[in-house]
Image: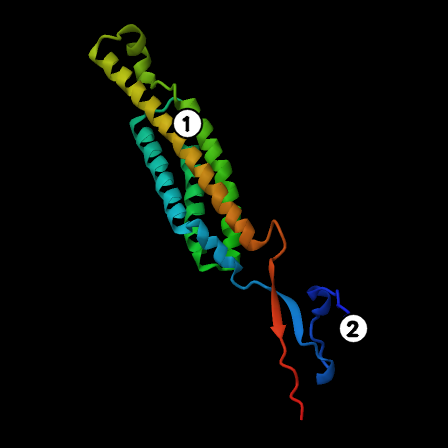
Amino acid sequence: MEVKVDTRTMAEEASVVEEGLPPSQTPLLSVSFERNVNWKQKYLEAEPKALGITQIGLSLFQIISSLVFMSKSLSVTPTDIPVIILSLLVLIAGSLTVAAQNLHLPTLRACLGMQIVAVTASIANMIIALVKMNDIPYFCRQYYYYEKNSTTGVYCHNLEGTISHLSSECVVINVALVTISITVAAYCCKVTNCCSPAPKMPVITVQAPPAQL
């Protein structure tokens, strides 16, 4: 006895149920592709609350430090105001990172845009911190070079070391902020589908055969 084997694959047999077909022609198995409604939950895997609060905290540190330098006239190069403005942009980006936990699509898109701005702002702050690393206040230049052993000379020497260490910390802080902004932007990009089309998941529907009388 010869047995014939149907070599058609499951994918060839599966088809979407068409409206208007009589029950006798309705396939028992249908495959359709539907948008994954839970895809936006992917954003929460980035721990946006922790990252956003970190951005806000580090930005506030840089703003407060710049305000102290301005109030004490410790800066040689006029970079404190730009640092404050750039840090405010990063602070706004951090606030949007936390706010985007509601998975509201416009908020996620705004968060993505601000994270791109935050990357640029953090890189600019990093360059400014490198420039300020060798700053010496105006009132210290004379004492530093000509009266190094005096009380004021020692004070200025210590002040120079403090400025150098603080600038080094700001470099490290801005490296961390760049990393955080890139991470959040990557997750926002995935959720808003700006880098790839919206993902779809296959849905297999099994139809019960019609009852035979």
Residue found 34% across the figure and 17% down from its top = 138
Q: Among all residues in the image, which is located at the extreme bottom?
A: 213
**In this rendering, would 25 be left or right of 192?**
right
Label 2 CA crowd tier, 10 Å (few <14, some 14–19, many 20+): few
Determine contact: label 2, label 1, CB under 8 Å.
no
- Which residue ends up furthest to the left in the rendered image? 151
x, y percentage for residue 210? 66, 85
Residue 126 visible in the shown view: yes
User: Quick one: label 2 or label 1, which is nearer the N terminus?
Assistant: 2
Image quadrant where one finds the N terminus: bottom right
Residue at point 44% right, 27% down?
128
**Which element carries disc 1, helix, strand or loop?**
helix
Q: Give the amino acid type for the residue marked by disc 1 in the picture.
A: Ala
- Mark identifier at residue 129: 1
Q: 198 above or below 68?
A: below
Q: Which quadrant of the structure image shows residue 74?
A: top left
- On the image, the x and y values in percent for residue 144 come to 30, 11
Q: Is residue 125 above or below residue 205?
A: above
Disc 2 is placed on an element classified as loop
Q: Which residue in the rendered view is the most extreme toward the top?
A: 146
The amino acid sitting under disc 2 is: Met
Give the number of the mark in front: 2 or 1: 2
Q: Where 146 sits versus 10, above or below?
A: above
Along the viewing direction, whichever of 104 and 78 lies nearer the viewer: 104
Q: Residue at x 30, y 19 (%)?
A: 161
Number of the label disc, if any, that sits on residue 1: 2
Q: x and y percent of residue 19 in the render?
A: 71, 79
User: Split into 4 quadrants, where in the image is the C terminus?
Assistant: bottom right
